[in-house]
Image: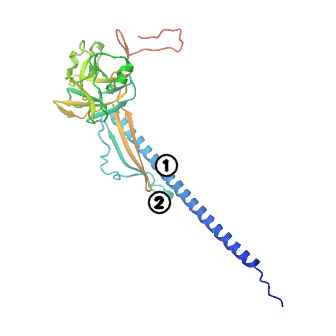
C-alpha cells in the first residue's frame, strides 16, 4: 500500500519569500527614515546658514549706520530697543518671488555705544586693554575698578612683592595697573598738556580712593580685597577726573596672573553710562523658523581730533608725522 508523499518545498519557498519581503521592507523603511532625517538636517542647516548670513547682513548695515552717524557728528545710542526679539523685521526676500515661502532677514538690530559698566577678561599676566573715553558725552569725576571675580576663597598677600611662583601658589588676586592719559578736548597743539598718571593697585585687606593728580610717588596703592566672596574680590577707585576740559584714555594691565575686570564711571557718586570707543552690534537673523544671533564689538572713535591713536610717544614728547622708509639702512624721516 502506497502512502502519499507531501512535497514541502513549496512551503519552504513561501516562508523564505515572506521573510525576504519583511527584511526588505524593514531595510526600506529604515533607509527612508534615515533619508528623511538627513534631508531634515540638511534643511535645518540650510535655514540656520541663511539666518546666520541674514544676521551678518544686519551687522554690516549696523556698522554702516554707525560709521555714517559718527562721520556726521551724531552719536548713536540704539538703532532698536530689541525688547522683543521678534520685533521689527527687515525682510531680505520680500522682492524675490521664488523665495516668498521663506522669509529671510533680521528681526532685531541694536547698536549700543554706552553702558553703566565695562567688563572684560585679561587672559594672562601682563595682558592689557584700553578704554578710549574721548567719545564721552556725560560728566564723570571718578572711575571704579573691580577685578578677580570668582567663587573661590582667595588669600590676601602682605605688603611685599613676592616672585611669580610664590604669588601664583599663594592663590593671591592679581595686582591691577591703571594708566590714565589725559589730553585737552578738541584740537590742540601743545603736546605738553598731555599728561600720564600711573596707579598700581596691590591687593590688601583695606584701601581707599586716590586722586589722579597725586599718583606720582604714591605707588603702590592698596586695594581692598575680600578673601571670600562670590563677586569681584578686589576693588579700587580713582578720583579727580575733569571731563569739562579733558578727554581720557585708560589702559588696564594685570600683573602676575590673568583676571576679569569691571570698570564703572561715577558722577557725584552716581553711576554714569559712558561710551568706551567701541560699539556693541547685536543682531538676530531669521530664516523660516531658524534664528541666529550675532554680537560684534566694533571700534568707532579716532581718539583725539588730531589723531592721538596714531601717535608715537618718545622720551621728549610726541611725534605725529613720521615716515619710515622700507630701506632699513635709512633713518626714519620725522619732521
**Rendered view: 57 above or below 72:** below
Place residue 67 in its image quadrant. Answer: top left
Q: Residue at x 26, y 29 (%)?
A: 227
What residue sits right under mark 2 in the picture? 101
The secondary structure type at the circle numbered 2 is: loop
* Spatial separation of the CA atoms under disc 1 and disc 2: 17 Å
- Return the x and y of residue 10 as percentages of the image width and height: 75, 78
> Is residue 191 something that shows in the picture?
yes
Q: Nearer the viewer, residue 254 or 95?
A: 254
Q: Residue at x 51, y 51 (%)?
A: 45
- Return the x and y of residue 88 as percentages of the image width and height: 34, 51
Q: Residue at x 33, y 34 (%)?
A: 70
The single residue placed furthest to the bottom in the displayed view is 1
Which image quarter is the C terminus in? top left
**Rendered view: 18 above or below 137:** below
- Return the x and y of residue 208 as percentages of the image width and height: 19, 23
Task: Say whether residue 66 is left or right of residue 95.
Answer: left
> Is residue 307 something that shows in the picture?
no
Q: Nearer the viewer, residue 70 or 223?
A: 223
Task: Mark 1 or mark 2: name the one nearer the start of the chain.
Answer: 1
Q: Nearer the viewer, residue 11 or 189?
A: 11
What residue sits right under mark 1 in the picture? 49
Place residue 132 in its image quadrant. Answer: top left
Task: Indicate how the structure is coloured in the image.
Answer: rainbow
Which image quarter is the N terminus in? bottom right
The secondary structure type at the circle numbered 1 is: helix
Q: Nearer the viewer, residue 321 or 207?
A: 207
Task: Say whether residue 107 is left or right of residue 40.
Answer: left
For marks 1 and 2, give the one nearer the viewer. Answer: 1
- Return the x and y of residue 323 as percentages of the image width and height: 45, 15
**Mark 1 Cα shell of 10 Å, populated few (<14), some (14-19), many (≥20):** some
Amino acid at each position: 500500500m502506497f502512502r502519499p508523499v507531501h512535497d514541502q518545498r513549496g512551503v519552504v519557498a513561501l516562508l523564505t519569500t515572506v521573510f525576504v519581503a519583511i527584511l526588505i521592507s524593514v531595510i526600506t523603511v529604515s533607509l527612508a527614515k534615515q533619508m528623511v532625517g538627513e534631508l531634515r538636517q540638511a534643511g535645518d542647516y540650510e535655514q540656520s546658514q541663511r539666518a546666520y548670513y541674514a544676521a551678518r547682513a544686519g551687522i554690516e548695515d549696523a556698522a554702516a549706520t554707525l560709521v555714517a552717524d559718527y562721520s556726521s557728528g551724531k552719536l548713536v545710542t540704539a538703532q532698536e530697543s530689541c525688547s522683543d526679539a521678534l520685533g521689527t523685521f527687515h525682510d531680505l526676500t520680500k522682492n524675490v518671488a521664488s523665495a516668498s515661502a521663506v522669509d529671510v532677514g533680521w528681526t532685531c538690530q541694536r547698536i549700543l555705544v554706552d553702558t553703566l559698566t565695562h567688563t572684560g577678561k585679561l587672559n594672562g599676566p601682563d595682558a592689557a586693554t584700553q578704554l578710549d573715553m574721548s567719545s564721552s558725552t556725560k560728566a564723570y569725576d571718578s572711575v571704579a575698578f573691580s577685578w578677580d571675580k570668582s567663587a573661590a576663597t582667595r588669600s590676601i598677600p602682605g605688603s611685599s612683592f613676592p616672585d611669580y611662583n610664590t604669588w601664583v601658589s599663594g592663590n593671591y588676586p592679581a595686582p591691577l595697573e591703571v594708566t590714565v592719559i589725559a589730553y585737552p578736548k578738541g584740537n590742540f597743539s601743545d603736546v605738553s598738556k598731555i599728561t600720564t598718571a600711573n596707579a598700581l593697585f596691590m591687593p590688601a585687606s583695606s584701601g581707599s580712593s586716590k586722586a589722579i593728580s597725586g599718583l606720582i610717588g604714591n605707588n603702590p596703592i592698596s586695594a581692598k580685597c575680600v578673601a571670600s566672596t562670590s563677586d569681584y574680590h578686589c576693588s579700587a577707585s580713582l578720583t579727580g577726573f575733569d571731563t569739562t576740559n579733558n578727554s581720557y584714555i585708560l589702559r588696564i594691565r594685570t600683573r602676575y596672573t590673568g583676571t576679569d575686570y569691571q570698570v564703572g564711571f561715577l558722577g557725584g557718586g552716581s553711576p554714569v553710562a559712558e561710551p568706551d570707543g567701541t560699539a556693541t552690534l547685536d543682531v538676530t537673523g531669521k530664516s523660516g523658523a531658524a534664528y541666529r544671533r550675532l554680537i560684534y564689538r566694533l571700534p568707532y572713535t579716532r581718539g583725539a581730533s588730531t589723531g592721538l591713536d596714531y601717535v608715537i610717544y618718545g622720551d621728549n614728547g610726541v611725534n605725529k608725522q613720521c615716515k619710515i622708509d622700507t630701506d632699513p639702512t635709512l633713518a626714519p624721516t620725522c619732521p
